């Protein structure tokens, strides 16, 4: 079964360092997303990406965050200067859009746990 | 007020029990509704979409009441493997932006 894959599974970094989280969405999907979940809290939307540009972003997704689809397969989330409060599980997701019949039928990766010290 | 509200539980039930979870949402313009399941420290996985007419998938039944802005999930004949956190999820739009709004989740523990 096709799946969304994410690397690394866990990253520990010092405050102020740059971090790049990588995702390989399902190959025929058109929409890509990042969500995050701080430990013990709800899953929160960060950003959606379609047709090589950001289609929507939340207030969490400030200038410290950026996303890129550098080639046909990878989708990355960069945090320029990490803060303690960036510690969370970051989930990548993808959907096929209308081709999958799917508003909201997102497929999530297993997540990248980021710990900022 | 939270956009999607759920009773966090935990709900502790014996195997074979029937259990129901409720969820309310505040944005009346919300267009689509889902239940996701999340196991401890894992990714959310779609359990089922929720339709106005109500829908059933095996032991799981979901209901939507748009007038009351209320969504429910009923699990019959609970199994140990049903132990998880159940996330009520709402999409504000009918387009495929996928901007899902998650509730905090309701934790279910099924005991032998």
Image (spheres, grey):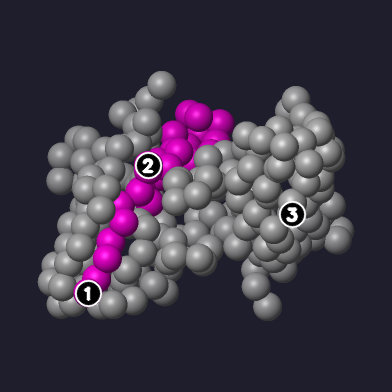
Q: In the image, is residue B91 part of the stretch drawn in magenta?
A: no
Q: Are marks 3 and 2 on the same chain?
A: no
Q: In the image, is residue A110 part of the stretch drawn in magenta?
A: yes
Between residue B36 and residue B34, name the one nearer to us. B36
User: Is residue B105 in view?
Assistant: yes
Looking at the picture, how far across and down is residue B50, in whole percent? 72, 42
Residue sitting farthest toward the front: B112
Q: Which residue is mark 3?
A: B11
Between residue B98 and residue B63, name the one nearer to us. B63
* Label 3 with label 2: CB-CB less than 8 Å: no
Quarter of the figure with the C terminus of chain A: bottom left
In the image, taking residue B34 as reference, residue A76 lies left or right, namely left
Looking at the picture, how far across and down is residue B17, in whole percent? 83, 38
Chain for disc number 3: B
Residue ID at (65%, 68%): B3
Report the disc number at residue A109: 2
Image quadrant in which you'd find residue B58: top right
Q: Is residue A27 above or below residue A66?
A: above
Q: Is residue A88 above or below residue A106?
A: below
Q: Which residue is mark 1?
A: A117
Q: Secondary structure at mark 2?
A: loop
Magenta extent? A91-117
Residue ID at (65%, 54%): B107
């Amino acid at each position: 079964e096709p799946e969304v894959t994410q690397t690394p599974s866990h990253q520990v970094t010092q405050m102020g360092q740059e971090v790049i989280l990588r995702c390989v969405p399902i190959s025929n999907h058109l929409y890509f997303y990042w969500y995050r979940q701080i430990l013990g809290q709800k899953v929160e939307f960060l950003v959606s990406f379609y047709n090589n540009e950001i289609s929507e972003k939340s207030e969490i997704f400030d200038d410290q965050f950026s996303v890129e689809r550098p080639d046909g397969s990878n989708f990355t989330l960069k945090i320029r200067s990490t803060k303690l409060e960036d510690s969370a599980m970051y989930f990548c997701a993808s959907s096929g859009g209308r081709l999958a019949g799917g508003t909201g039928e997102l497929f999530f990766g297993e997540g990248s746990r980021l710990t900022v010290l | 007020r939270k956009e999607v509200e759920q009773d966090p539980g935990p709900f502790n039930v014996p195997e074979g029990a029937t259990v129901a979870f409720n969820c309310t949402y505040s944005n009346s313009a919300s267009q689509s509704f889902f239940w996701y399941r999340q196991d401890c420290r894992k990714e959310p996985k779609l359990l089922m979409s929720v339709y106005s007419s109500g829908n059933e998938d095996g032991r799981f039944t979901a209901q939507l009441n748009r007038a009351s802005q209320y969504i429910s999930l009923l699990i019959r004949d609970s199994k140990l493997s049903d132990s998880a956190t159940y996330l009520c999820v709402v999409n504000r739009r009918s387009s495929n932006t996928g901007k899902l709004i998650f509730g905090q989740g309701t934790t279910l523990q099924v005991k032998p």
